[in-house]
Amino acid sequence: MTEVYTRFVRGLLFPLHERLKGHRTVAVHRELERTQWLSPPALQTYQNDRLRGFVASVYRQVPYYRQLLDGLGFGPGDITQAGDLARLPLLDKATIRANTDALKARDAQDLARFNTGGSSGEPLVFYIGKERISHDVAAKWRATRWWDVDIGDREMVVWGSPIELGAQDRLRRSRDRLLRTKLLPAFELSPTNLDRFVDQIRSFRPRMLFGYPSSLALIARHARAMGQRLSDLGIRVAFVTAERLYDDQRADIEQVFGCRVANGYGGRDAGFVAHACPQGSLHVTSEDIIVEIVNPAGENLPAGESGEIVVTHLATRDFPFIRYRTGDIGALGDQVCVCGRGLPVLSRLEGRGTDFIVAQDGTVMHGLALIYVLRDIAAVDQFKIVQESLDRTRVLVKSQPPIGDAVVDAIAAQFKRRLGAGVTVDIERVEDIPRERSGKFRYVVSAVDAHDRARKAGAG
């Protein structure tokens, strides 16, 4: 009966849902299922063909890129293959902020406004069209099927974005019930809630999990500490994303839930960049996304060398992301995966971790729970949250002009709601926020090791 319902969702309900939303997800997915088996040279040809059409459309319709290419003395015909992108400047968040309207295609319709989570302390507002949504959903769908699960199979999602958690109206809940998706809030990981989440997972009996690796690992550790068995539920895979996946997290998730862990890489801004296959390779969605690895000077690095991941998303004609700096560090591989797919792979993915924050009552929260307080305050340019102890947290805020006392009081009140009324929240208005000695920027820093806190919470 379960397989019959899954086929109903996959073959009828989900395609109808996407068609009503004006998305081409089903057609795109069908094409992606075909192209993944092309040889690397054939995939490169396919990608270059798409790139030429993409650049031509962007040149015609997007004022920012029309002016940029004209200023460089380039026409759209000068960008014919992925290697030619190196002739263009990198795109960063500051450039997008300064040119938001000029980055919108003149013929764009029904653009949706999105935000990044602000993991660098600098949240970004940008826009996505229906083409981009269709391609990202189709890419995720394809990767899901690699693991012998499909749309319509029971899915437990442990997530924390207000975009998801704030949209749980009647229509959304009805849709999730029909698609058999259940959402657990990743921000609310107190011991009491962890007990409830374990019970809900046992009751729901999902075929797949999806969420932050830190949150899934914390639930796993809590279940093990409580003597709750979850490996008998028939869970096939745990999809994790949005953070760096640590080895101990993978081990705990696999042991407690009795399933494999599939790592994914991407973001609201960069798109669905890469996902792991059962053989362990992190495959790039190269039909839609061109990945470059660059050094600090913006120069391309060869396969095997680590540098910043830069992406060009070929389904972003309405609001282009061309040579977009992700701020993440990784390396491309030079070997074809034994799974037989011609898709290129990321051989390393580094520097993506999100700290936990612990409230006075012992609640363990995803670091984004505090980031979201600051993310949408227009005056805030950059921030850093430093939890010095359970009783004191400092917030460094860079803004121009400096934020007023009313905003300071509002931030402090929101932090106290999450951390506890007795916590001292010191908000410091600063002109600059220093980076770590490594050169990386940490937006959340705690005096207690994140893994140690998670283990303690899971045990108690």
Image: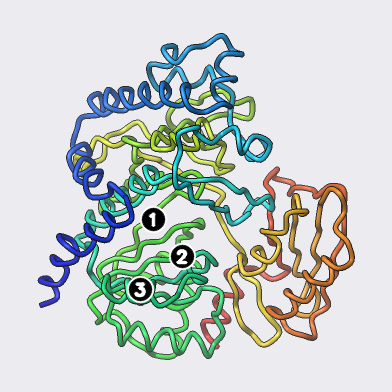
Mark 2 surroundings within 10 Å by alpha-carbon count, few (fewer than 14), some (14 through 19), many (20 or more): many
**Residue occupying image coordinates x 52% and y 85%:** 459
| Label 1 residue SS | strand
Residue under numbered circle 3: 156
Q: Amino acid at mark 3?
A: Met
| Label 3 residue SS | strand
| Label 2 residue SS | helix
Horizontal side of 196 relative to 307 (left or right) equals left
Q: For the residues marked 1 and 3, what is the alpha-carbon distance in whole angstroms?
A: 16 Å
Residue under numbered circle 2: 213
Residue under numbered circle 1: 263
Horizontal side of 311 relative to 73 (left or right) equals left
User: Could you tell me if the residues under marks 1 and 2 are in contact, i.e. CB atoms within 8 Å?
Assistant: yes
Q: For the residues marked 1 and 2, what is the alpha-carbon distance in whole angstroms?
A: 9 Å
Q: Nearer the viewer, mark 2 or mark 3?
A: 3
Q: Position of residue 389 (x, y in %)?
A: 77, 75
Q: Closest to the observer: 393 or 438?
A: 393
Give the answer, above or below, for where 10 lies relative to 315. below
Mark 2 vs 3, N-terminal side: 3
Mark 1 surroundings within 10 Å by alpha-carbon count, few (fewer than 14), some (14 through 19), many (20 or more): many
Q: Amino acid at mark 1?
A: Asn
Mark 1 vs 3, N-terminal side: 3
